[in-house]
Amino acid sequence: MDRMNPIDVSFLHIEDSDRAAGLHIGSIGIFEGPPPPQSRISALVDGRLDLVPRYRQRVVTVPMGLGRPVWVDDDAFELDYHLRRTALPSPGDEETLRRLTGRIMSQRLDRTKPLWEIWIVEGLTGDRWAMISKVHHCMVDGVSGSELLAVILDLVPEPPEPVPSTWVPQHPPSSAELAADALWELATSQYEQLRAFGSALRRRNQLVEDARTLLTGIASLRDVTAPTPDLTLTGPVGPHREVAWASAPLADVKRVRAEFGGTVNDVVLTAIAGGFRALLMSRGAPLDEGGVRSLVPVSVRATRADGAAAGDGQLDNKISGMFAVLPVAEPDPVVRLERVRIQLAGVKDSHQAVAGEALTSATGFAPPALLALGTRLASRLAARTSNVHTVTTNVPGPQIPLYLGGRRMLTAYPYVPLGAPLRTGVAAFSYDGTVTFGVTGDRDSAGDVAVLAEGIAESLDALVEAAGG
């Protein structure tokens, strides 16, 4: 048994408390040429699942809530259930693919089975096909999620011969075993907590510095508790999703960064701010000087030498978050970038992400039943009084071409889930020299997210032009 960590469990609780939420992340890869035969893809995936055991495990709850849920092997695992195939109706263009993606992403994953699906989609125009993947957020965050794709995809166009799987499921634990294991962990964890506390006391200087950093971050987090103006971006959310896409050369983003300063993420958020400006203007909504407040998930994994987040092979969530205000009232894209750059530099200095990680980690000390209750109550409260308008995330991906069954992946669009009261979300993903934006909207209240995607592209074009591109 592998017990879920508190953050992973919270994604299940949030989904439980919101019938319209399906908290799975995903991606849409578009490939060249005809798709490989289904038997070939099945053999390839089956052998490589040995490298990611979580893909053959399901969530099992502990009796009476004595402990957090655990991952156990699914002794009834069927690959064909998770690996599906379909075809686009005529005309088979990308708009048709987006509609299909919205329908697939609107469906929740079955909790009684491993929490993932892959759809092979034939019939895309231009002699192309697509792969739509979805995996529950309780399994993996965006950074480690890119590692999972790397397990299935190849680095070279010549596909290796599939390796037969050697997986044999372990016998699932009984209810009595689950309860006994939870009670033992509950008893022993108190000792571990006291031991860790004693070790920290022996490092007084470091403890004081860590406390100062944490308090600085918590102080900055107080600002996000203030209610935000209603900009039509929040409210009740239904079960259906609408998706829209945009893309740009990564070289253009880097050119803007080199000309005006800041980071790649600053440029990306500025483009997204321009997209929200276009969306609000199209709706006739006021462009509030307070801006659009966004939750920005941040990876707290180790970083590579280039500063990008690096996965560590563990398939769980290592994320925190900070809050950014997108200056949608500012008409000049260059001034908008400067405001974003200065703001995010201040947010980083305030240690918001450190505070967020510490606060979420602290939930590990709470009894599982209280954690579940607290998460559900927080989700319900957020549905009534929103302090943010949207969620925006930027995940760096591989800058080399990837292949599946000998077919090159041309581009990849990310998918970000929604939860009430947020009606829109934006994810950015960089792959092989291109930055793509995946926009998710509640179909009933934000079916116009194509305007947001077009606004992102136009905002980035304006920045490139200002940079002399």
Image: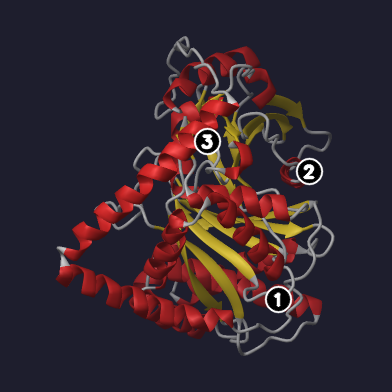
Instruction: Name the residue that disc number 3 marks.
Output: 70
Marks 3 and 1: CB-CB under 8 Å? no
Depth order, front residue of 216/267: 216
Q: Do we see residue 134 in this rendering?
A: no
Quadrant of residue 133 within the rendered picture: top right
Percent across and percent down for residue 8 are 52, 48
Query: Residue 385 shows which numbered tag?
Result: 1
Percent across and percent down for residue 87 are 76, 29
Q: Please rate how many residues cluster around mark 1, counting C-alpha atoms within 10 Å: few if below 14, some from 14 to 19, many from 20.
A: some
Q: What residue type is labelled 1?
A: Thr
Query: Residue 136 shows which numbered tag?
Result: none
Q: Residue at x 73, y 79 (%)?
A: 231
Q: In this view, does 300 lie to the left or right of 76?
A: left
Q: What residue type is labelled 3?
A: Val
Check the image and report above or below for 352 versus 357. below
Q: In this view, does 245 lie to the left or right of 250?
A: right
Q: Is residue 51 left or right of residue 171?
A: left
Q: Please rate how many residues cluster around mark 3, counting C-alpha atoms within 10 Å: few if below 14, some from 14 to 19, many from 20.
A: some
What colour scheme governs how the chains and residues are painted in the rendered image of this protein? secondary structure
Depth order, front residue of 106/8: 8
Depth order, front residue of 361/187: 187
The answer to which of marks 3 and 2 sits earlier in the sequence is 3
Secondary structure under the numbered disc 2 in the rendered image: helix
Q: Which amino acid does label 2 sit on?
A: Arg
Query: Residue 103 shows which numbered tag?
Result: 2
Check the image and report above or below for 262 versus 56. below
The answer to which of marks 1 and 2 sits earlier in the sequence is 2
Quadrant of residue 236 within the rendered picture: bottom right
Percent across and percent down for residue 354 are 37, 67
Between marks 3 and 1 in the image, the one whose residue lies nearer the viewer: 3
The answer to which of marks 3 and 1 sits earlier in the sequence is 3
Between marks 3 and 2 in the image, the one whose residue lies nearer the viewer: 3
